[in-house]
Amino acid sequence: MEMKEIHANASYKVLSVSLGKGEGMPLHHASSDAFLVIRVGKAVLKLREREVVLEPGDTMVIPANEPHSLHVLEDFAASVVLASGAHILFTKS
């Protein structure tokens, strides 16, 4: 998994996230709403109440503090927009 900040200002920041087929992001949440724009690939986003298949061109808002995880079905890349001071926090196992 690669996650890097590609833009930031006083209001928001943009992260580029990429993962290979079979990789995933364990349970985590962001401290602000997260706006996702899927650029490449296919993945399953697991939320508390449902699962969503994400594909190129899809957009989605994940509310602040909503626990979720991601399982990649095809090499995957997305842009994630967060509030400027937001943090991504992974759940300790």
Image (cartoon, grey):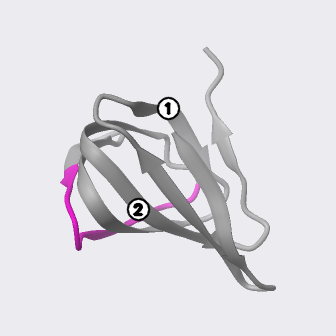
Magenta residues span 53-64
Which mark, residue 78? 2
Left or right of residue 38, residue 69 in this image:
right
The answer to whether residue 28 is left or right of residue 88 is: left
Identify the residue shown where x is 22% and y is 66%: 56
The residue closer to the viewer here, 8 or 51, is 8
Where does residue 12 sit, x and y in percent of width and height?
Answer: 68, 79
Q: Residue at x 75, y 73 (%)?
A: 84
Q: Which badge, 2 or 1, comes first in the chain's sequence?
A: 1
Query: Could you tell me the amino acid type at mark 2?
Result: Ala
Q: Nearer the viewer, residue 75 or 14?
A: 75
Residue 66: x and y, percent? 50, 48
Secondary element at tag 2: strand
Q: Label 1: which residue? A: 27
Name the side, left or right, on which 3 lies relative to 20: right
Where 43 falls versus 69 (above or below)?
Answer: below
Label 2 crowding class (10 Å Cα cut-off): few <14, some 14-19, many 20+? many
Q: Secondary structure at mark 1?
A: strand
Q: Quadrant of residue 69?
A: top left
Asked if the magenta segment contains residue 72, the reply would be: no
Say whether residue 57 is magenta: yes
Amino acid marked by disc 1 = Leu
